[in-house]
Image: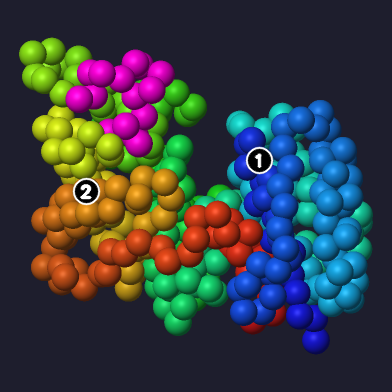
Amino acid sequence: MADFAIGIDIGGTNTKFGVVDRNGDIIEQGRTLTNEHENVQEFIDELFLQLSPMIKKAGGAKEFVGIGVGAPNGNYYTGNIEHAANLKWKGIIPIASMMSEKFDMKVKLTNDANAAAVGEMMYGCAKGMKHFITITLGTGVGSGIVIDGKIVLGHDGFAGELGHVVVRPGGRMHKGTGIRGSLEAYASATGVRETAIEILTENPDTESLLRTYSLNDLTSQAVYDCAVKGDKIALQIFEFTGQILGEALANFIMFSSPEAIILFGGLTKAGDLIINPTRKAMEENLIQVFKNKVKLMFSELKEADAAILGASALVWEE
């Protein structure tokens, strides 16, 4: 029986990869720049070059169950990356079949948010759960929905884009999609920055530590740093963000009745500042039958490892 899997997380800037054992321990890992390769074959060749010594060290290809890949717009059904906005390789890329040919291994692909959900189910705090939702609060808002122990993929492989659900009709413009008022426009790290700019502009006479930052330095981290010091506007930003996120989560609960919603990503480092207003708004917007039933929790997976673990979890036999 094979003892190892390879997990690969393809991001817009970096691609992380590693060798993972059945316990979810990353034996060895590395990274490469994604977009420095003009075509996808060069990128796969580079991955092969870097992973080959790791594969050899683990006893060769026969010791591996396969390769799991998480990627933007990765389609589990087809094994293709389809029209990913933040990658150089445009159109439809048959990356799973190309990698399978190069590595001579089984390759499974899904989008990065679904990979995170699979990782949470196999290695994280969703172990043993059959109904849960993961929400990744990073530069954007990613999501993975698990019902009856299976990722919801939809008829075409792209179900579960909860970050693009409209939560404020006619609201803030999302620069990437052109949609107004989507969850991602408010509850991502980028959204927190936008909220900070809006509130500071609308309240020119209110003192705030945030006014000491240049526009370039006004990040979600800066908002957190000021909130911890008790800054009134910074605290207001987290209250507003939590309100919108909580309302959205209430809708998601009434749709799929999950056991838990697991929050992950950079914004969760704000801890109570984000989870408390989120939980409050979530509970306030649920009908009675759903109230106080759904756990709202932070992921226990290390952020640095989660993407590799989630991708590798795709190929283990059930």
The residues bearing labels 1 and 2 have C-alpha atoms spaced at a distance of 29 Å
Query: Residue 282 is drawn in which quadrant?
Result: bottom left
Residue at image coords 34%, 34%:
220
Q: Quadrant of the N terminus?
A: bottom right
Closer to the camera in the image, 119 or 149 = 119
Closer to the camera in the image, 73 or 209 = 209
Position of residue 20 relative to residue 135, above or below, is: below
Query: Residue 53 is drawn in which quadrant?
Result: bottom right
User: Can residue 2 be found in the magenta stretch?
Assistant: no
Can you give x and y, in whole percent of width and height, for residue 265 in the image? 43, 50
Q: Residue furthest bottom?
A: 1
Can you give x and y, in whole percent of width and height, for residue 154 in the image? 53, 57
Residue at image coords 89%, 45%:
45
Circle 2 SS class: helix
Q: Kindly identify the amino acid type of the residue bearing the numbered disc 1.
A: Asn
Q: Which residues are magenta?
A: 209-223
Q: Quadrant of the C terminus?
A: bottom right
Residue at image coords 42%, 78%:
129
Q: Is residue 245 visible?
A: yes
Q: Is residue 90 visible?
A: no
Report whether 4 appears left or right of 270: right
Report the disc number at residue 14: 1
According to the image, label 2 marks what residue? Answer: 273
Query: Residue 264 is drawn in which quadrant?
Result: bottom left
Residue at image coords 41%, 18%:
216
Position of residue 311 relative to residue 230, above or below, is: below
